[in-house]
């Protein structure tokens, strides 16, 4: 079993839809959870950063972490064509220097 | 202002011809990483530096080497590139203050390597 599992998609939605992206993981020592957005041929950029369980909201983006289920989610409200990108989940143990990434989900938002 | 800079953005080399990719950062972060990312795959960590301490991943081929002459710069050397080494190479940095709420891993724009 991979440490982090993420459905690669692709996922295609109409503009304005609510998008739900998810990752599961097996290592209960992970404490910090991130979502990165990566546009084609660019480096990943950090979208959301969450410590331990709970929700975090930033504009149209909401990150959820459920450590009991080892499950994290990213919700995008009122999705826009500019949200079309690959979304990578990533996580790290406290005291570690190494992120563990999911494979990424490719999202297309159609106008 | 760019915080993690990678040069060149695109690199073409010939099979077996050594190539060096560079990364610089203006964040004064003490940890720097090199990742390899192939199409539709997650970034794969090759190695990282914690200050001057080099940490190689167990499955990184010997063909890949790295140098960090100072805090700001880090280089990836591919001694004899093969066709399978064609990929995007990403540099990232962090201050490794996980838990402070202020730190995370910042990526550069990447260098796309083509091997002919």
Image (spheres, coloured by chain):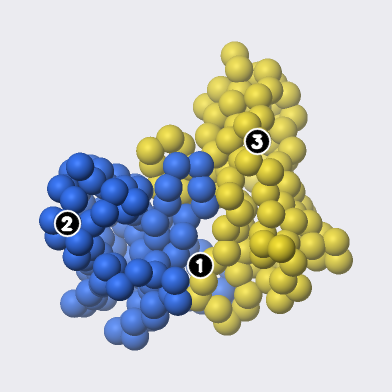
Q: Which residue is mark 1?
A: B103
User: Mark 3 packing: few (<14 Cα in 10 Å), some, or many (20+)?
Assistant: few
Identify the image quadrant of the C terminus of chain A.
top right
Residue found at x 23% / y 46%? B115
Please name which of the two marks, 2 or 3, marks the residue nearer to the observer.
Answer: 2
Residue found at x 54% / y 66%? A99
Quarter residue A7 falls in: top right
Q: Which residue is mark 2?
A: B16
- Label 3 and label 1 in one chain: no
Q: Which mark is residue A9?
A: 3
Q: Residue furthest right?
A: A68
- Label 2 and label 3 in one chain: no
Query: Secondary structure under badge 1?
Result: loop
Please name which of the two marks, 3 or 1, marks the residue nearer to the observer.
Answer: 3
Q: Residue furthest top?
A: A111
In this structure image, what is the colour of chain A? yellow
Height in image: B50 above or below A68? below
User: Mark 2 packing: few (<14 Cα in 10 Å), some, or many (20+)?
Assistant: some
């Amino acid at each position: 079993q991979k440490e982090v599992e993420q459905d690669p998609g692709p996922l295609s939605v109409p503009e304005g839809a609510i998008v739900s992206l998810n990752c599961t993981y097996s290592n209960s020592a992970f404490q910090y959870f991130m979502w990165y957005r990566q546009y084609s041929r660019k480096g990943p950029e950090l979208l959301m950063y969450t410590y331990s369980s709970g929700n975090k909201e930033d504009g149209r983006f909401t990150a959820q972490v459920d450590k009991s289920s080892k499950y994290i989610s990213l919700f995008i409200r009122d999705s826009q064509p500019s949200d079309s990108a690959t979304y990578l989940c990533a996580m790290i143990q406290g005291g570690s220097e190494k992120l563990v990434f999911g494979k990424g989900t490719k999202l297309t938002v159609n106008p | 202002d760019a915080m993690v800079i990678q040069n060149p953005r695109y690199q073409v080399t010939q099979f077996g011809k050594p190539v060096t990719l560079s990364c610089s950062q203006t964040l004064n972060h003490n940890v720097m990483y090199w990742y390899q990312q192939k199409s539709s795959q997650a970034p794969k960590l090759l190695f990282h530096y914690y200050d001057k301490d080099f940490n190689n991943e167990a499955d990184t081929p010997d063909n890949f080497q790295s140098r960090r002459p100072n805090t700001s710069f880090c280089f990836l050397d591919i001694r004899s590139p093969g066709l399978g080494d064609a990929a995007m190479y990403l540099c990232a940095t962090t201050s490794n203050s996980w838990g402070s709420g202020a730190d995370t891993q910042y990526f550069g724009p990447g260098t796309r390597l083509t091997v002919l």
